[in-house]
Image (cartoon, helix red, strand yellow):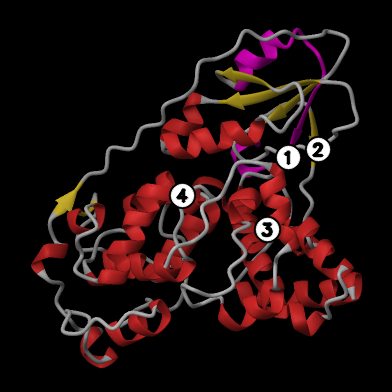
Amino acid sequence: MKINEPKASKEEMLNRLHSLDPIQYGKSRNFVDGAVTNLSPYISRGVIDTKEVLEHLVSKGFTYFQLEKFIQQLSWREYFQSVWQSNGEGINADLKHDQHARITHGMPRAMHEASTGIEAIDKAIDLLYKEGTMHNHLRMYTAFLGCNLAGFHWKQPAQWMYYHLLDGDWASNALSWQWVAGTFSNKKYIANQENINHYTKTSQRGTYLDTSYEELSILNPPQLMLDQYEPALKTILPPSEHLHVDPDLPVFIYNYYNLSPTWRKDEKANRVLLLEPQIFNQYPISTQCMNFALELAKQIHGIQVFVGSFEDLKIAALNSPIHYREHPLNNYYQGIKDERNWITSSHNNVQGSFFSFWKKAEKEIRKTYF
């Protein structure tokens, strides 16, 4: 079940990109030992864009049909980001349907302690704590257990998982939990022990999930899943550096979602990693995640770390022109905005389900790249 622990370097990211096998990925990605890419921490931190990944694979001569499953997964990421763009903080509440959760605060203590009794899930939670990684299928199983079996509202368990994930992307994380909980889909996701055993290569029997789907849909949660735990999620920010700003050069702002070493790399500029306490109070991350981001930032030549608000940075920047990359978490920045490198234009004004989004995106992708 082990996922290769990400290393915070551009070289490691490139190694993973060049070893990517999209054909095997399409066949086996749902299995814990499948050909997953291990690129998501670098995509989430903005080290590489989804478009760059796709263009690399196209340059290697893969056909559309060989890449279709992989492109769909890249498109899911862009879809979630687009929903975040369109709804802003609206994604922090039930988006389409009310969950009607039995327990509206906290999360199952058994989940926090990796003692749910489901071996594959408990091992995955242990790995999440140790390495900051979790296979996507295990994320769904964990969300199902917390939301649809135990009946907790999705928000705090989703924050707990985001806190520990090196590839934490609040849009993908929050909206995936909402999809499982049925607040961003038309039905709740459930999985029994047989399904979990199949995709995790385990053989556990006799658990509370070892039943049919008909019985599972009306199953009362076991007592061990009802003990409530309030996760204390706090970000430890690094010391702020005293900025040395050349007033004759612009200021390029980087943040937790933009650590690209290639963004405007040939231009002379003051390069600043902006870490805003208000953002990390609302979307806290673990020390492991912060250290991973800080190591990635070292790949950016001349980067300086500034802890404070955007307004504080404006003052420290001595009125130099400011450049930044678009993202839902920095829509209040002021300056010259660069768009991210999207695969398609379908991210604009996204409405409806992923499959309506995909219908438009697929046509554009096939016309543009193949």
In the image shown, does 85 or 57 lie closer to the viewer?
57
Mark 2–mark 4 distance (CA, rounded to whole Å): 24 Å
Instruction: Kindly indicate whether the residue at mark 3 contacts the one at mark 1 (C-beta within 8 angstroms).
Output: no
Q: Is residue 303 left or right of residue 95?
A: right
Q: Residue under circle 4?
A: 165
Mark 3–mark 4 distance (CA, rounded to whole Å): 18 Å
Q: Is residue 176 left or right of residue 245?
A: left
Span highlighted in magenta in the image? 310-332
> Which amino acid lies under the numbered mark 4 shown in the image of this protein?
Leu
Q: In which quarter of the view is residue 309 placed? A: top right
- For residue 260, the mark is 1
Mark 1–mark 2 distance (CA, rounded to whole Å): 6 Å
Instruction: Kindly indicate whether the residue at mark 4 contacts the one at mark 2 (C-beta within 8 angstroms).
Output: no
In the image shown, does 32 or 312 lie closer to the viewer?
32
Is residue 92 within the magenta segment?
A: no
Q: Is residue 146 above or below residue 299?
A: below
Q: Residue under circle 3?
A: 16
